[in-house]
Amino acid sequence: MCAQDLKKVYLLGEEKIEVLKDVTLSIPKGKFIALCGPSGSGKTTLLNIIGGIDRPTSGKIFVDDQDLTVQDENSLSDFRCNNVGFVFQAYNLVSTLTVAENIAFPMEWKQKPFEEIEKRVDELLDMVGLQHRANHFAAQLSGGEQQRVAFARALANNPELILADEPTGNLDPKNGQKIIQVLQLLKSQGKTIIVSTHDEQISGLADQILFLDDGKLASANE
Ligand SMILES: Nc1ncnc2c1ncn2[C@@H]1O[C@H](COP(=O)(O)OP(=O)(O)OP(=O)(O)O)[C@@H](O)[C@H]1O
Ligand SMILES: [Mg+2]
């Protein structure tokens, strides 16, 4: 993916809040990127724009040669469903659906055949080590378990680009470790991964670390 001169400005009355200031970056396929920076520096905003959840005020964003800034809401939804796996900081599971139903959801949205969905849900439950919780409601799981379900759901349609917003931010070290194993596996599968994080173990896995500071990309080291 690549981004050119991304700006994000919020207007609060007369006040202009510049959240992203001319962010330009290019991330080759298959790279694992850690996005670091203090609270409020714009990490979530940038991930949301890369994933087509939010739009920049100006600038361009290309993912897989698609210019996200010219697409209408319907094609952006399609783009997200087919190309991006998004893991939110607050998990965002549907609490009244079971674990298996949450994971199946993106595939049902694409109207995939039932047998295919069932097989993929099994594979993903296995991958995140939650086979035994398949039929429990999401609300009955611990934070660490919910985060693993969120990863499984993000991977349901086998996206090439995975975006994760502080995936270990709310977890204790033991649960964080399980998420790190999932990230390592995805890295070994050649996925493009962008993770916003304060976790040094995650940035240690990264091919490149990007620092956001007050909406500017401060430095990047290989
Ligand atoms: N809808 C909004 N309206 C006004 N300002 C906003 C809005 N959303 C975000 N901001 C501001 O944009 C800035 C960047 O927010 P963002 O959530 O991207 O930061 P962050 O780097 O992810 O922080 P954290 O590490 O705390 O998650 C913050 O100052 C925030 O207050
Ligand atoms: Mg954030």
Image: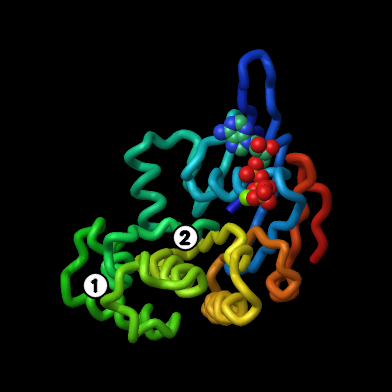
Crowding near the residue tagged with mark 2, few <14, some 14–19, many ≥20 C-alpha atoms within 10 Å: some
Q: Which residue is drawn at 44% across and 80% down?
A: 128
Q: Residue 35, relative to residue 148: is it above or below?
A: above
The quadrant in which residue 112 appears is bottom left
User: Which residue is at the far front?
Assistant: 140
Q: Mark 2 points at which residue?
A: 91
Tag 2: amino acid = Tyr
Nearest to the observer: residue 190 or residue 169: 169
Q: Which of marks 2 and 1 is nearer the N terminus?
A: 2
Q: Residue 115, relative to residue 139: is it above or below?
A: below
Nearest to the observer: residue 122 or residue 189: 122
Quadrant (top left/top right/bottom left/bottom right) for the C terminus: bottom right
The quadrant in which residue 9 appears is top right
- Horizontally, residue 67 falls left or right of residue 217, namely left
The quadrant in which residue 19 appears is top right
Q: What is the spatial separation of the Cα atoms under label 2 and label 1, in whole angstroms?
A: 21 Å
Nearest to the observer: residue 58 or residue 204: 204
Q: Residue 117 carries which label?
A: 1
Residue 94 position within the rendered picture, expressed as x and y whole percent measured from the top left: 33, 58
Residue 199 position within the rendered picture, expressed as x and y whole percent measured from the top left: 71, 68
- Horizontally, residue 219 falls left or right of residue 97, namely right
Q: How many labels does the image show?
A: 2
Q: Residue 111, relative to residue 146: is it above or below?
A: above
Tag 1: amino acid = Ile
Q: Which mark is residue 160?
A: none
Q: What element carries label 2?
A: loop
Residue 92 position within the rendered picture, expressed as x and y whole percent measured from the top left: 43, 56
